[in-house]
């Protein structure tokens, strides 16, 4: 059975950064390392896609300018729109191969002893929602 976590492209790097901050041991730490590697691969894809879709709107790293040398507002709006669209696209992380290690990570962070605040609390909630979808649904299926 395929096991996946689903994030928006814009969430991938913050999730990896959050995971890097956690103090974990043994199998949970190995699960974190595997997940960070999978997230890093998705982040590279996202950055490549981002560059590809934004290239038509930029020259030498700057937004295209009109005949008077001012930023072309129409071009700027189009660039913003395509970049926002790609940020919201779904990044699917297939971790089937590392399922045991990621389950250990999930179990380790369910009752993580430290408190989270600000953006860390938001990322923790996002990550736990994804883990719960996978691991709690699987437990329910196994019970049947």
Image: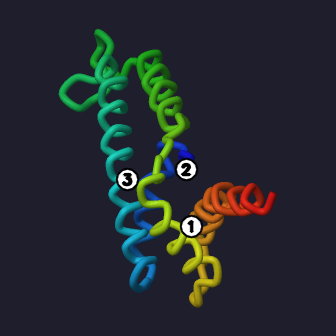
Residue at the spot 57% in from the left edge and 88% down from the top edge: 114
Please tell me whether mark 1 sits on a helix, a strand or a loop.
helix
From this viewpoint, which residue is outermost toward the left? 60
Give the spatial CA distance, label 2 vs label 1: 26 Å
Q: Which residue is drawn at 41% across and 17% down?
A: 75
**For mark 1, does the 10 Å Cα neighbourhood hold few (<14), some (14 to 19), or many (20 or more) residues?**
few
Query: Is 50 placed above or below 6 here?
Result: above
Residue 7 appears anywhere in the view: no
Q: In this view, does 48 lie to the left or right of 116?
A: left
- Report x, y in % for residue 73: 45, 20
Position of the C terminus by quadrant: bottom right
Which one is earlier in the sequence, the residue at label 3 or at label 2? 2
Residue 38 x %, y %: 37, 53
SS assignment at label 3: helix
Q: Which of 101 and 48 is in front in this view?
A: 101
Q: Name the residue under label 1.
A: 119
Q: Earlier in the sequence, mark 2 or mark 1?
A: 2
Label 3 near label 1: C-beta < 8 Å?
Answer: no
* Displayed quadrant of residue 27: bottom left
Task: Tell me the CA gap for discs 3 and 2.
Answer: 13 Å
Residue pointed to by mark 3 = 38
Depth-wise, is mark 2 or mark 1 nearer the camera? 2
Residue 10 in percent (x, y) is at 48, 46
The CA distance from mark 1 to mark 3 is 21 Å
Q: Mark 2 points at which residue?
A: 3
Q: Could you classify mark 3 by the number of other residues whose Cα lies within 10 Å: few (under 14), some (14-19), or many (20 or more)? A: some
Front residue of 4/49: it is 4
Residue furthest out toward the right: 144
């Amino acid at each position: 059975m395929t096991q996946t976590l689903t994030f928006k492209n814009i969430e991938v790097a913050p999730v990896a950064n959050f995971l890097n901050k956690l103090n974990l041991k043994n199998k949970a730490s190995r699960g974190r390392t595997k997940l960070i590697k999978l997230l890093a691969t998705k982040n590279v894809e996202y950055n490549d896609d981002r560059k590809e879709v934004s290239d038509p709107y930029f020259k030498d790293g700057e937004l295209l300018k009109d005949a008077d040398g001012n930023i072309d507002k129409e071009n700027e709006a189009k660039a913003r729109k395509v970049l926002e669209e790609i940020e919201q696209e779904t990044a699917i992380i297939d971790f089937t191969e590392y399922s045991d290690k990621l389950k250990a990570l999930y179990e380790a962070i369910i009752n993580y002893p430290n408190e989270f605040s600000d953006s860390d609390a938001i990322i923790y909630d996002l990550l736990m929602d994804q883990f719960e979808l996978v691991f709690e649904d699987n437990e329910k299926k196994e019970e049947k």
